[in-house]
Image: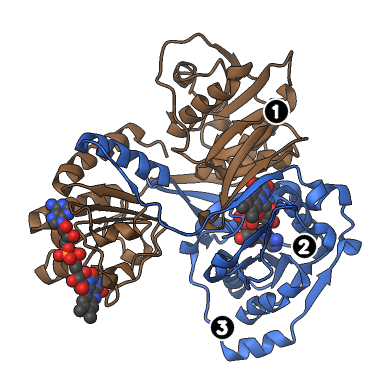
Amino acid sequence: MEKGGQMEIWVFAEQRGGELHKVSLELLGKAKELASKGGRVTAVLPGHDVKAISRSLINHGADRVLLADDPRLGIYRIIPYSLLLGGMIQDHRPDIFLMGATAMGVELAPRVAAKVKTGLSAHCIDLSLDSQGRLLQVVPGWGGGVVATVSCPEHRPQMATVMPGAMKALPPKEREGEIFEVAVELPDENLGPEVIEITQEKPQGLPLEKAEVVVAGGWGIGSRENWQLIQELASLLGGAVGATRPPVDEGWALEGQMIGQSGKTIRPRLYIGIGISGVMHHVVGMEGSDHIIAINSDPNAEIFETADVIVVEDFKKIIPPLIREIKNRLKKQGSSD
Amino acid sequence: MKRIIVCVKPVPDPKHWGRVSMDPDTMTLRREVIPSIVNPLDKHAIEAGLSVRDSFGGEVVLLSMAPPSAQPLLREGLAMGADRAVLLSDPVFAGSDTLATSLILAAGCRYIGDFDLIFLGNMSIDGSTAQVCSQLAELLGLPNVMHVTGLSWTNEGKVIITRKIENGFSKLVGIPPLVLSVRKELNKPRYVPFTGILAAESKEIRVLSNNDLKIDPSQIGLAGSPTKMAGLEIRRFERKRERLEGSPEEIVRKLMDKIYQIGVI
Ligand SMILES: Cc1cc2nc3c(=O)[nH]c(=O)nc-3n(C[C@H](O)[C@H](O)[C@H](O)COP(=O)(O)OP(=O)(O)OC[C@H]3O[C@@H](n4cnc5c(N)ncnc54)[C@H](O)[C@@H]3O)c2cc1C
Ligand SMILES: Cc1cc2nc3c(=O)[nH]c(=O)nc-3n(C[C@H](O)[C@H](O)[C@H](O)COP(=O)(O)OP(=O)(O)OC[C@H]3O[C@@H](n4cnc5c(N)ncnc54)[C@H](O)[C@@H]3O)c2cc1C
């Protein structure tokens, strides 16, 4: 509803077990920017006993929080969540509604959009307003080979899911904001499948071909002790360890971990190659990876030809602090999902 | 089990993606020159349907919204062991976004009728929105679960569903009818025996148009889709080769952002 030109922008505050997903704060940052020409940012927070999160939402840019507190919303389930959000949209008629492209958001947003019969764009990497104040949503397709700009000219709200990390959260500061508790009306029955268990993954000794993340080390790692850094990084990222020929020859890695012409061919979401020169023998086994990060002290290393992200540095200066950072991040995330 | 529907989408073969071009007037991709394949995850969806049928009986029906030229791809699914296929083909369906696509598929499901389960792939490789599962389920008024990596059954006919979430899994228990979209970890699509290919020749592919489905034309196709293409750009497949500069501390911070963006932590 555009009251006197005020645009109403909603952000879904995603939490599991009371832990807010970082993408929600990033979306608030973006929403605040979109609202800078006249608009209000509302965070929509469903859950149970989660009022405490409201403060953080306000400090990151929410002008108000619509809090839907109910035991039936304690654990995410698609039917009660979509009924709630669909009803709230019909009551308040926001112009824009943003959600994170997380496991939860990817499932929930389309259901809500279909309920209120509006358009939705998926996995957005950028958002902006055109001259008429309409939301332009940049979405990748065809494995990133096609980039489409999607708009939703006639239906409201304009809905989008946004990739985590694509937007920047504002630095938190003490801000004023209102918290409204909305009445939760849900049927007693037919709320769909029940969640009976949530487990954290302890991915150890994951087979290379199945891993979403592969951390591969080469001759440049230098020693068996250093090799433990490769193993630690891989396990923190929930991934598997890969290797070139020399580490296998040295006995740091097992034969089954070798990637390349005479080893395995992998296509993980993320490949990180450390201390690897990048000869074709190895590259043919990893070039199908979605994302490739290469760390090598030699600026002319061949592997950089096949990399999305290039780090020219001694790995001993990068990997130990990186491991610390990831540990910190994981500690903060806790049991957020 | 009475009936299991599996949604199958023909998609352009990634081996030939380099040949795609764009029609700037209509803002659509010219993909006629690119051969189609069955969306890879949909083979896992077919396998899921077949293995439920093998344990509990019933029939597996493939459902696709695509041009008539998709029939040979449906034969592949029939060769895997599906019992029959329904192809929804009509020029008025062209240009549908996910909501319109889901409306058409929902009409197809109702036409087929009497189903206990609908399986989909979690995501297509071309549009790759991953929006159809939830929208189809909403339009049919049924619960759905995405990211499915495991299925097992209790003696009372309930289904235990394992699904991937960030850093882990959750388990749900549900009662059919359900709409489920699957990830590749769920199963390994079966090998197609030569006898399967022969048997597929005589299986039915029923082609339906909107004369059969009778969906309000203002709700489907390009005109009925709430989303519009405001721009389209083709990027050639090249590695980004972005060098992270700065002190080791700065590089580590930038590296963290990159890893986070890729979505693995
Ligand atoms: C680059 C690009 C970007 C796009 N962005 C958007 C967008 O942001 N919003 C939007 O609404 N539309 C968008 N579209 C259009 C969208 O791709 C089409 O609506 C498409 O028909 C269905 O979506 P999908 O392929 O993304 O399906 P997904 O939801 O990714 O597919 C999941 C599963 O649904 C089933 N399925 C999907 N389509 C069919 C079908 N035709 N027949 C049978 N089963 C099927 C399959 O089992 C498939 O594995 C985009 C298209 C392109 C090319
Ligand atoms: C028939 C045949 C088949 C083969 N099949 C395979 C195969 O399947 N898989 C495979 O991997 N190999 C295979 N090989 C071996 C292959 O040719 C290469 O010898 C091997 O891949 C090189 O491994 P590397 O990159 O780890 O070592 P090197 O080429 O020695 O590279 C080490 C790299 O580490 C970097 N470095 C050194 N110190 C540091 C530091 N402190 N920080 C950061 N970077 C540092 C260096 O700059 C250098 O680029 C095969 C060979 C033959 C002949």
Residue on which the image places disc 3:
B192
Mark 3 neighbour class, 10 Å CA radius: few under 14, some 14 to 19, many 20 or more: some
In the rendered view, would you say B153 is above or below A295?
below
- The secondary element bearing badge 2 is classed as loop
Disc 3 from disc 1: Cα separation: 48 Å
Disc 2 from disc 1: Cα separation: 33 Å
Point out which mark residue A89 bears: 1
Query: The residue under label 3 is which amino acid type?
Result: Val
In the rendered view, would you say A330 is above or below A40?
below
Q: Are marks 2 and 3 on the same chain?
A: yes
Mark 2 neighbour class, 10 Å CA radius: few under 14, some 14 to 19, many 20 or more: some
A256 left or right, relative to B258: left
Query: The residue under label 2 is which amino acid type?
Result: Asp
Disc 2 sits on a residue from what chain? B
Residue on which the image places disc 2:
B114
Q: Give residue A136's position: percent from left, percent from top.
A: 64, 36
Mark 2 against mark 3, which lies toward the viewer?
A: 3
A82 left or right, relative to B66: left
Disc 1 sits on a residue from what chain? A
Q: Say if disc 1 is inside 8 Å of ligand 1.
A: no
Quadrant housing residue A153 = top right
Q: Are marks 3 and 1 on the same chain?
A: no
